[in-house]
């Protein structure tokens, strides 16, 4: 799923700690038999952003550099809507003659695209690329299925805790240092200021809920022998689910108002001054700055179970991959490097706020823009990802986890029943994808 500089719906991939991202192997073996022409025009599909002009300028510079060093080669860039990418990419996989040479894709799509045989295995080229050595290990995992590489990371994003400094100062409280303290602080604020959500939460905000599950020691699923089995109904996972769903109610965020909220809506509630805290991404910074709370908020990593710990965050982002059907494989790989290299990522951060995937470039970005620091700390503490299975796409599209949360906060099911039902649906999706 895509995670971008706008307040994007949660999305996008790094590693599910403790699990190996094996996923499913491609249905057909990778081959260069389609051709490797050294001249010609390469077609590239990139995502259309809400404010796309700055991105276009960075991309144009990278393309100009590529064309200067590759005589006889040109690149045509098309910006496609994120919402319709699934249909267009599927059509491209089914009709190689009309397919582009490179695509930008959400990092949770990696396993599915590999299963569909759409992405080229570029493991050798990635290993030989000097800059790749500085790629954050979790970002590298986002392009990995089994032991093969299927693209290059373009940017990464994580979420942290936004809080109102003016409200906290008025009430004489400090930023919470544990997850239990986060919950009690949220309820205290709402009690003192009933016109504010203490912490804006959403029943449809899957990626805001995941850190509670992971901080409790739970997992979404466990992998064995290349297959996944749901673990959302384990004892530890249920502890995290109970912690998150305890925030829905008249003492913080009423279920009638908050059960249907997604990530966008929770950040909007904070940015508009309706919440004292929210779990938002580095990519949410611009929207918060544009709202009435500008100058009256701060950001810290979302606290974990114990004081001083950081809750594992879902790390999203986008990658750029070469299609197996490309007749310009070598050129396509070189253009991929131009579009995802250090120089381009540094410029993309300046233009769009996308966090670089190279540790040294990201550290430089954090020094340049202090707001990045808590997100960099969150990444450094260990980000997590969704199961590296093509089945995750079905799980996500079917709203299995949001349905589980909403069933609990509405009182229709208890945690045990709702998580058991969700696990059954997840296992069916994993089986369908195997």
Image (tube, rainbow, N blue to C red):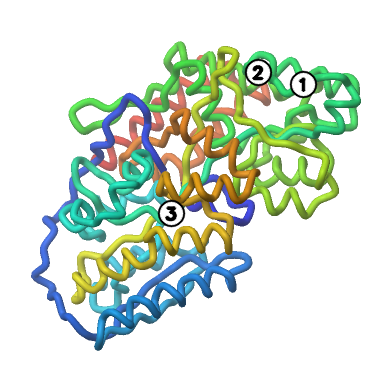
Residue drawn 58% across the image and 55% down it: 353
Residue drawn 21% across the image and 84% down it: 39
- Estimate the spatial distance between the alpha carbons at disc 2 and disc 3, rounded to whole Å: 31 Å
**Residue 260 position (above or below residue 62):** above
Q: Residues within 10 Å of mark 2 (few under 14, many from 20)?
A: some
In the picture as drawn, the residue positioned furthest to the bottom comes out as 72
Using the rendered view, name the quadrant where residue 267 is placed.
top right
Secondary structure beneath dot 3 equals strand
- Estimate the spatial distance between the alpha carbons at disc 3 and disc 1, rounded to whole Å: 35 Å
Q: Are marks 2 and 1 in contact (CB under 8 Å)?
A: yes
Which mark's residue is nearer the viewer, 2 or 3? 2
Residue 317: give x, y in percent of width and height. Answer: 46, 49
Using the rendered view, name the quadrant where residue 23 is placed.
top left
Earlier along the polypeptide chain: callout 3 or callout 1?
1
Residue drawn 42% across the image and 77% down it: 77
In the picture as drawn, the residue positioned furthest to the left comes out as 33
Earlier along the polypeptide chain: callout 2 or callout 3?
2
Residue 407: give x, y in percent of width and height. Answer: 60, 27
Q: Residues within 10 Å of mark 1 (few under 14, many from 20)?
A: few
Q: Which mark is residue 177?
A: 2
Residue 191 is left or right of residue 52, and the answer is right
Secondary structure beneath dot 1 equals loop
Residue 290: give x, y in percent of width and height. Answer: 77, 55
Using the rendered view, name the quadrant where residue 415 is placed.
top right
Q: Which residue is mark 3?
A: 318
Q: Which residue is mark 1?
A: 174
Q: Are marks 2 and 3 in contact (CB under 8 Å)?
A: no
Q: Are marks 3 and 1 in contact (CB under 8 Å)?
A: no
Residue drawn 74% across the image and 46% down it: 268
């Amino acid at each position: 799923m895509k995670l971008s500089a706008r307040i994007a719906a949660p999305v996008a991939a790094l590693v599910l700690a403790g699990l190996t991202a094996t996923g499913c192997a491609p249905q057909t073996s990778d081959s260069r038999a389609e051709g490797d022409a050294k001249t010609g025009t390469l077609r590239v599909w990139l995502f259309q952003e809400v404010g796309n002009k700055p991105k276009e300028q960075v991309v144009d510079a990278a393309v100009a550099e590529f064309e200067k060093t590759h005589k006889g080669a040109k690149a045509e860039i098309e910006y496609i809507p994120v919402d319709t990418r699934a249909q267009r990419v599927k059509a491209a996989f089914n009709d190689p003659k009309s397919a582009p040479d490179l695509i930008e894709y959400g990092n949770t799509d990696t396993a599915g695209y590999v299963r569909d045989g759409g992405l080229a295995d570029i493991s050798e080229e990635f290993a030989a690329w000097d800059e790749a050595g500085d790629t954050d290990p979790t970002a590298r995992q986002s392009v990995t299925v089994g032991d093969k590489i299927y693209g290059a990371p373009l940017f990464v994003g994580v979420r942290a805790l936004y809080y109102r400094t003016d409200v906290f100062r008025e009430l004489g409280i400090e930023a919470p240092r544990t997850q239990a303290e986060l919950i009690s602080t949220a309820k205290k604020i709402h009690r003192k200021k009933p016109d504010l959500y203490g912490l804006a939460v959403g029943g449809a905000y899957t990626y805001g809920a995941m850190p509670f599950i992971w901080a409790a020691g739970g997992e979404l699923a466990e992998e064995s022998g290349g297959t996944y089995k749901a673990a959302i109904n384990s004892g530890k996972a249920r502890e995290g689910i109970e912690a998150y769903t305890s925030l829905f109610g008249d003492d913080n965020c009423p279920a009638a108002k908050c059960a249907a909220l997604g990530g966008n809506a929770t950040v909007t509630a904070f940015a508009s001054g309706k919440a004292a805290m929210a779990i938002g991404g580095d990519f949410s910074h611009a929207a918060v700055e544009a709202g009435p709370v500008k100058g009256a908020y701060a950001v810290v990593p979302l606290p974990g179970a114990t004081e001083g710990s950081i809750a594992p965050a879902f790390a999203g982002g986008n990658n750029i991959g070469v299609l197996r059907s490309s007749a310009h494989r070598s050129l396509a790989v070189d253009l991929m490097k131009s579009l995802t290299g250090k120089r381009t990522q540094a410029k993309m951060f300046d233009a769009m706020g996308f966090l670089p995937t190279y540790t040294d470039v990201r550290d430089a970005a954090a020094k340049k823009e202090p707001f990045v620091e808590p997100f960099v700390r969150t990444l450094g503490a260990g980000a997590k990802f969704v199961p590296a299975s093509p089945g995750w796409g079905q799980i996500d599209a079917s709203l299995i986890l949001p349905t589980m949360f909403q069933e609990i906060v509405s009182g229709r099911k208890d945690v045990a029943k709702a998580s058991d039902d969700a696990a059954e649906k997840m296992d069916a999706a994993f089986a369908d994808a195997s």
